[in-house]
Amino acid sequence: MKYSKMFVKTLKTAPSAADTANHRLLVQAGFVRQVMAGVYSYLPLGLRVLNKISNIVREEMDTIEAQEVLMPILHPSALWKQTGGWDKIDVLFKVKSRTDREYALAQSNEETVTPLAKEWIHSAKDLPLAIYHINWKFRDELRSKSGIMRGREFLMKDMYSFHATQEDFDKFYAKAKVAYMNVYKRLGLVAKATEASGGAFTEKVSYEFEVLTDAGEAPVLYCDKCDYCVNVDDIKTYKLGDECPICHKDNLKSAMASEVGNVFDLGTKYSKAFELSINDSEGNKIFPIMGCYGIGISRTMGVIVEKFNDERGIVWPASIAPFTVHLCSLNTNDETVIKKTDAIYESLTKAGIEVLYDERTDVGAGQKLGEADMIGCPIRAVVSTKTGDQIEVKMRSEKEAKMMSLEELINTCKV
């Protein structure tokens, strides 16, 4: 991608209304634009990041044999009235058509996935079943804040599983937990699983996946030696410095954390509501146990920006950066520099490396380098009259630059 052709550039100043790092940096660096509180347009750079997060999630869900579908955003009110959610869920957006029919905008998809699964589940042989989709969700937040971390419209992966027994659900949850931890590890995040109440979804215990970050919204106690973590507000049994109740190998520490995923044991609430039943081995009618597994894709993007930034801008983890290399040509009044940088761009692209090439001739070196830092690609490569036959390469996370040959740069990109 050539910078001069890119839709929407960086801004010289941060948006005045931004109260969080992710809002300020994502807008200023040209990743998003706010339409209204809690609603954003994702620009080419931002969409590339969203898609990369989504693809990592897909790959890990596929490892536990979940199958991807795409369910609708617009739901008939009858489905929500059948489960009781129409009157009980206060964040549900309700719309009425010109024929006076009522609809809901999806804030989750239990109401559509259960009737869908009912078409395929006829006996215990059809279980377990796990299906997921990645789609936009809507919640009528009274005060949408924290940039893209708490939106009225947001991108989410939600998966639903169906089981003949509680034991089978527990086994699948254990697999899902591993897949979730793999997702966060690939995103460069350290996540912990905490117990929490099920809220509007279920009276059973649910699990939240929290990322430890100073920009977090909730105080937690956690163990460094295992996955144990708990929200401070939910438990009074333990305190800072107590021995970990799970592994007994370390003392509990305190930190702030942001929720990036959750799991709900839905029990039989939705299978009963939609009369999804099977016969057990003795011929008795039973209702499958359901699980719901969410990962906030856009929210996670916001959490990553909150965690990985410095005074110059965003510092993207390599796995989800919009481009691997931000290539800058300086001294663009020199034809030799232009030709050399063009050739490097072509070689990197042919090698399968994603490159954002700032080839502009009407912009100075300071602005180019400043914008490269703000956008935050993992590698900045500079060509100028001073670099000669080599390339000045600087990792975004490091302070010092190194001189490299084209071959060395390509090898660095593929590590």
Image (cartoon, helix red, strand yellow):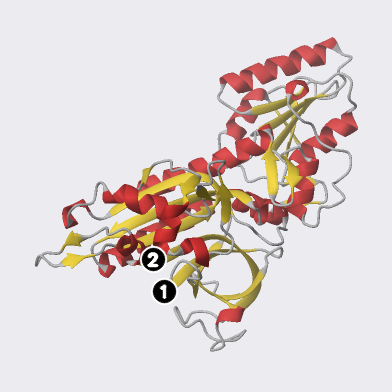
User: Which badge, 2 or 1, is on the more N-terminal residue?
Assistant: 1
Q: Quadrant of the N terminus?
A: top right
Distance between the alpha carbons at the discs numbered 2 and 1 = 7 Å
- Location of residue 114 in the rendering, given as x and y in whole percent from the top left corner: 35, 54
Label of residue 204 in the image: 1
The image shows residue 362, relative to residue 409, as above or below, that is above
Asked whether, in this view, residue 243 is left or right of residue 18, the answer is: left
Label 1 crowd bin: few (<14), some (14–19), many (20+), radius 10 Å: few
Report the residue marked by disc 2. 266
Q: Residue furthest bottom?
A: 237
Q: Residue furthest left?
A: 282
The image shows residue 201, relative to residue 348, as above or below, that is below
Q: Element type at marker 2?
A: strand
Q: Is residue 311 visible?
A: yes
Q: Quadrant of residue 412?
A: top right
The image shows residue 268, relative to residue 129, as above or below, that is below
Label 2 crowd bin: few (<14), some (14–19), many (20+), radius 10 Å: many
The reply to whether discs 2 and 1 touch (Cβ–Cβ < 8 Å) is yes
The residue sitting at 63% across, 40% down in the picture is 321
The residue sitting at 85% across, 20% down in the picture is 385
The residue sitting at 44% across, 59% down in the picture is 81
- Location of residue 346 in the rendering, given as x and y in whole percent from the top left corner: 65, 17
Amino acid, disc 1: Lys
Amino acid, disc 2: Leu
- Location of residue 263 in the rendering, given as x and y in whole percent from the top left corner: 45, 63
Q: Is residue 109 visible?
A: no
Asked whether, in this view, residue 74 is left or right of residue 388, the answer is: left
Q: Quadrant of residue 272?
A: bottom left
The image shows residue 260, relative to residue 408, as above or below, that is below
Q: Element type at marker 1?
A: loop
- Location of residue 228 in the rendering, given as x and y in whole percent from the top left corner: 50, 73
Query: Count of labels shown?
Result: 2
